[in-house]
Image: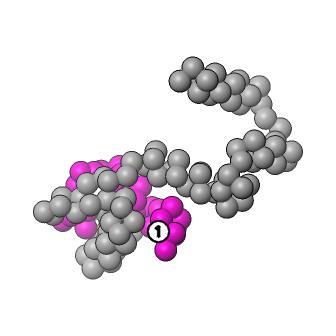
Amino acid sequence: MEPYKLGEMEQKFADLIWQHAPVASGELVRLCEKAFGWKRTTTYTMLKRLCLRNLFVNENGIVKIRTTKEDFQAAQGEQFLKENFDGSLPRFLAAFSRRKKLSGREIEELRQLIENYEEE
């Protein structure tokens, strides 16, 4: 099980939790029934999977965030770069920009990110 790869429904479920956490597990069951048509057992099975990946924790019936959505997405990006571009962000940007021209706004955003990084 790769910690930063989620199936489609796992991703939707994680997004639901990130949106509502902290959330009582009974309320989460109701939210999932409404959003996905899931039964209680399906919700708890999916929750257990995501808890095993250290995304969430169920403490005394309250589901809490262990890994923020932003941190999870950053780790997904790092894993993607490592698997596909030997961890090189410049190689990724070069490949990406060959197929899609960057807008002036995107170029400026990248410059600003680099400047902020250099200041740190």
- Position above or below: 53 against 40: above
Task: Assess whether residue 94 is covered by the magenta stretch.
Answer: no
Is 30 situated left or right of 88 in this image? left
Answer with the quarter of the image where residue 93 lies: top right
Colouring method of the image? one colour
Q: Which residues are magenta?
A: 1-29
The residue indicated by pointer 1 is 9
Magenta-colored segment: predominant secondary structure = helix
Is 114 situated left or right of 28 in this image? right
Answer with the quarter of the image where residue 38 lies: bottom left
**Residue drawn at x 72%, y 55% as measured from the top left:** 86
- Image location of residue 95, percent across then percent down: 81, 48
Looking at this rendering, what residue extends furthest in the left direction? 60
- Image location of residue 80, percent across then percent down: 64, 57
Task: Assess whether residue 10 is covered by the magenta stretch.
Answer: yes
Q: Would residue 100 be visible to someone looking at this image?
A: no
- Image location of residue 17, percent across then percent down: 33, 56
The crowd level at tag 1 (other Cα within 10 Å; few <14, some 14-19, many 20+) is: few
Is 95 situated left or right of 81 in this image? right
